[in-house]
Image (spheres, grey):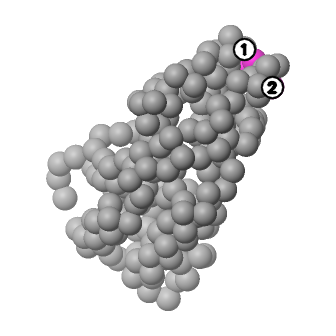
Amino acid sequence: MSGPDPRYFIQYRPDPSAFGDLTRLQTALSRAGGVLVREPELHVTVIHIGSLRRLHADLSRQGSTISLSSLREGLDGYAAWAETAMLPGVTLQPSGLELWGAERGVVVLRFAKDAPLLSLHRQAAERLMALAGNWIPGRRPEELFGTLPQLRHAMSFRPHMTLARYEGQDRAVPDGAEAMLPADVSLVADTVVQWGRP
């Protein structure tokens, strides 16, 4: 398959009305030395699949014989289902700021669990597992997902939004930042199939 490499995500982006609160929170992180995630890249991921070509290459290394076109056909069908299943918008309640990552250098805004979004994740994960059953015959999807970096966390869902990254600084949520958490954050559904995004 030639041409652009499609990337697959089920995710939500901040509604424009939420950017003011998020910008004020990011400003506090920036003053503490954080490298901010740009506004167009702020999102809450429900399911991340990522690059079609990367997934195909990873599956091939594990012995899959599925063709790139067949893999894309299955994922396009999955994306079509997701586009209809996604809620047009959701409102989440922030529950705190945390440092994530191997070096605790990623600042995330955690959200309280939301029943409709949890239901969407459960449905999306189950459908993805059913689809993955065709990728390597005889291989359990749960086992397969654990070996694929882009799908390793598909079965779990911790709603969060990455706001900033610390590079070399003392890694700590700055004093006063928690007090700036908005009461809620409104999100809107994003396009499932995207092009050219890293």
Give how far across and how far down residue 68 sits, in percent.
27, 66
Q: Quadrant of residue 55?
A: bottom left
Q: Which residue is pictured at 59% across the width and 46% down the height?
A: 92
Residue at the far top: name it.
Answer: 31
| Disc 1 element | loop
- Residue shown at 64% from the left, 23% from the top: 25
Q: Which residue is mark 2?
A: 172
Cα–Cα span, label 2 and label 1: 9 Å
| Amino acid at circle 2 | Ala
Observer-nearest of 2 and 177 = 177
From this view, report whether residue 46 is shown above or below residue 131. above
Residue 93 on the magenta segment: no
Q: Amino acid at mark 1?
A: Ala
Q: Quadrant of residue 100?
A: top right
Q: Which residue is mark 1?
A: 32
Q: Are marks 2 and 1 in contact (CB under 8 Å)?
A: yes
Q: Which contiguous range is marked in magenta?
A: 168-173
Q: Which mark is residue 158?
A: none
